Structure formats: structure tokens, C-alpha cells
Amino acid sequence: MEADVLSDLLRAVRLRGAIYFDFNLSAPWVAAAPESSRAAAILMPHADHLIEFHVVARGQCWARRLGGEPMLLSEGDAIVYPHGDPHVMASSLDLNSVPSIDFAPGLELLERARAVEQLPLVIEAQPGKPAEVSFVCGFLGCDLRPFNPLIAALPREIHIRRSGARDDDWLGAFLSVTVGEARARRAGGQNMLARMSELMFVELIRRHLESLPDEQTGWLAGLRDRQVGKALSLIHREAARAWTVADLAEAVASSRSAFAERFARLVGMSPMQYLTSWRMQLASELLVGSSQTIAAIAPQAGYESEAAFSRAFRRMTGLPPASWRRDRSAPAETASATRGASFPRDSESAMGDLQT
């Protein structure tokens, strides 16, 4: 049975998410979102990286990543910024008037989200006026270190369109349920939204994987390739095994040289580099998530001695295993410490970015 490499990675990098804001807006409005790293310390202190997403529940609006092209989002659409790039959401591309959303400077809106009893925080640009567009916003946190090849393999933005096709029915229904859950504020709702956010991201990755052109390179392209994908599955299934390039090449019915070249071209590193990197990611998971000794973790990471494992771990992370465990084993995040999103009031520059 082959390993599910994508599921392995998402589990190992501790993907977790939540929906933080429920926007109900009437034109004209503009909301400028900075790079997600600005909110990281308050939003998810123990996450290396934040991914931001928006799901449109009603109406239409525009989204534009700084330096990118504007995208029109319609009801049932979702847009994800895997690299946490600054971006703008707006009612129109014609933004000559003062925006109707008066966001406070800095991270004050983030603090407001932390103060509410139950997320998401509802934002209305013009209270009392019928909303023309509604969308929810959230973040997904994950680890980048020691090893996360997925983020680098993703584009700066991914737009999921609700096409109305039969195979899209479930995704459209799923997005509708997500928005409904965000607004129902039922017991257990935040946990439900966290899981739904993660499921949405997994489906987005699967659809992106299916749409890759034949000439695409990167970790996802390697995952899709018959020979390289099988080798990745073998590595993930038996990470502690003393693999050689020749062993992997034989297992995927290829010559050693052809397999090594194909793997490096698609994945961006040699099979042995990938094996070592994946072992360190698994070891980091055990260091933080278990009470096992370093000596017990070493053989699970494919090393015969604690000393050899410690040297390899330090080469990759810059820290010995004990220091990594100490630094990463801070108290678990509380609900109040993992809420919010940041939309600062730099509205004039935000409008300029959108129109540029």
C-alpha cells in the first residue's frame, strides 16, 4: 500500500486553521491586508507561516495581490494566498472615493477579534444598510521548518471558481456550509470551522495538482509523476529504511542515473537530500509531540546513534534536538491567542496598489 504523501506532509507540518472575520459590506469599500507575517505573533504564535483565504458568500468583489492582476470573485468563489502576500479586497476597481471601512492603525482590529467571545468577528462597513457582498476571511497556520516543500511549490494565489459543473457541486455546498457555520455561532463552531478550513485547503491543493501542466516542476509535480511519486511514497512509508538511490531506482523500475536526474529535476533536490529532509521533519514532530528520548527518536529517523542524528539535525535546523524541543514545546495556544486578522488603515496606499 502506497503512502499518502500529501496527507503525511500536512500532518507533519501541523496544518491548522480558523475563520476570523465575517464581512457584510456595501459599496464603496476597500480593505487592505498586509503580509500575514505581521499578524502571526498574535494570530498563531507557534506557527512558522500563515496562509490567508477568503470565501465569498454573496455578491461580487475584487481581490488583488500586491504586484498581481485584479481578480473578480463571485458568489461561491474562494481565493487563497499561500505565501501570505499583502493584498486588497474591494468593491470596485474605481476607488477614487474614501473607503467606507475605517480600519484603525496597526493591529487594533486583531485585538478586537481577540476580545470577542466567539469568532468570527462581524464587520459591517455601513451598519443598517443592506449588504451587497458578504465574505468570510481566515488563516491557516503551518510549520516551515525543518522541511515543508509544499508552500514553495504553490503559486502566489489560487482562485477556486464555483463553475456550477456537477463535479463542483459538493465544493459549492461545502463553501456554503462553511459560511453558514461561521454565522450560526453554535457550540463547537470554532472547532468545526478550523477543520473545514483545513479540508478546503486540501481540496484546493488537489485541484491545483490536477491542473498542473506537463512541463511543471516542483514537489507537487514530482508527486504526480509515476516514478518520482512512487519513490516519494516509499520514502514516506519507510523513512527509517537505509535507502540508496539504487534501491529507489530499482523499486520504480528505472536506471539509477535516469531516476536521480528525473527526481532532482522535478523535486528540486536529490533523492538522498529529500530523504534526510523528510527524516528531520518527522524527528521534529516526535521531539515536540512526544516525550520520547532523543536516543529513542534517532533510529526512527534512520540513524544508528543519537550522536549521528543530533549532528544531522543541527546541520539542517541550526539547533541541537534538545534545544529544538525546548524552544518549540511552549504552552499550547489558547483560543484567545489564536484569533484575528489584520487590515490596517493604510487605505490610500491600498487603493493605489489595487489600481496600479
Image: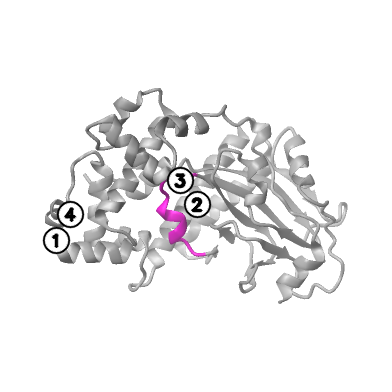
How many other residues sit within 10 Å of disc 1, few (<14), some (14-19) or many (≥20)? Answer: some
Residue type for callout 4: Val
Between disc 4 and disc 2, whose residue precedes? Answer: 2
- Where is residue 247 drawn, in percent x and y? 13, 51
- Disc 4 versus disc 3: distance between alpha carbons? 25 Å
Q: Nearer the viewer, residue 58 or 268?
A: 268
- Disc 4 versus disc 1: distance between alpha carbons? 6 Å
Name the residue tied to disc 2.
Answer: 201
Q: Are marks 4 and 1 in contact (CB under 8 Å)?
A: yes
Between disc 2 and disc 3, whose residue precedes? Answer: 3
Residue type for callout 3: Arg
Between disc 4 and disc 3, whose residue precedes? Answer: 3
Q: Is residue 220 magenta?
A: no
Relative vertical location of residue 306 with respect to residue 277 in this rendering, above or below? above
- Disc 3 versus disc 1: distance between alpha carbons? 30 Å
Q: Does residue 158 appear left or right of residue 186 in this picture?
A: left
Q: Does residue 186 appear left or right of residue 267 in this picture?
A: right
- Specify the segment rendered in magenta: 143-155
Name the residue tied to disc 1.
Answer: 256
- Where is residue 90 drawn, in percent x and y? 74, 65
Name the residue tied to disc 3.
Answer: 145
Q: Residue at x 72, y 50 (%)?
A: 342
Q: Secondary structure at mark 2?
A: helix
How many other residues sit within 10 Å of disc 4, few (<14), some (14-19) or many (≥20)? Answer: some
Between disc 1 and disc 2, whose residue precedes? Answer: 2
| Quadrant into which the N terminus falls | top left
Q: Nearer the viewer, residue 10 or 77?
A: 10
Between disc 3 and disc 1, whose residue precedes? Answer: 3
